[in-house]
Amino acid sequence: MDENDQARLAEFVTSRTPALMRVAYLLTGDRHAAEDLLQSALAKTIPKWRTLRNADPEGYLRAVMYREQVSWWRRLRRRRETVVTETAEAVQPDPSGGTDVRLAMRAALRLLPPDQRTVLVLRYYEDLTENQVADVLGCSVGTVRSRTHRAVTRLRRLIPDDELLEVRR
């Protein structure tokens, strides 16, 4: 890699890291795991930088992050570990408006299995279509639909509508 490519890479990493960290955090639900995910994705993307520099390096890097996350949760399933979930604490209304909803949503998202959380991030945060999510995750559109349905159903159970309505008033 020549000096020009190194400068472009450094500029790309510096400018896009905050946005990529947000996506990684949404995928993992943990700051340290998000840092590991982004670092792993960067390690796989940097050797291909010469071919990516004129294309869409961020799109490629995001796809690597999604695939890495899918690989991680598949490995976790193979280990057959029992994950102990945290109990969702009741969130008290916050006068700053909306903070309690964000906290409740964050707590509820952490209780979702990684595959469901990943589908929600891709569908609603990244605004991808079901077909695009299926391509990124390497699964069928039906699988994307069922995971999305299960995730939204679980979120609705964890955060009842009446709790969200109280916050909006």
Image (cartoon, helix red, strand yellow):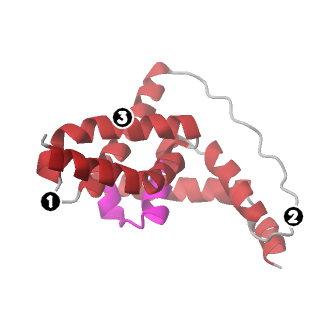
Q: Amino acid at mark 1?
A: Asn
Q: Residues within 10 Å of mark 2 (few under 14, many from 20)?
A: some
In the shown orientation, is residue 55 left or right of residue 18?
Answer: left
| Residue on which disc 3 sits | 40
Q: Residue drawn 69% across and 35% down? A: 85
| Residue on which disc 1 sits | 54
**Is the residue 86 above or below the residue 79 in the image?**
below
Q: Amino acid at mark 2?
A: Pro
Q: Mark 3 to mark 2: distance in Å? A: 38 Å
Q: Residue drawn 36% across and 67% down? A: 129
Marks 1 and 2, the one that precedes in the sequence? 1
Q: Is residue 68 visible?
A: yes
Q: Is residue 130 magenta?
A: yes
Q: Main secondary structure of the magenta part?
A: helix
Q: Which residue is more in the foreground, 100 or 138? A: 100
Q: Which residue is more in the foreground, 80 or 15? A: 15
Q: Position of residue 29 (x, y in %)?
A: 58, 43
| Residue on which disc 2 sits | 93
Marks 3 and 1, the one that precedes in the sequence? 3
Q: Position of residue 135 (x, y in %)?
A: 27, 54
Q: Residue drawn 14% across and 59% down? A: 54
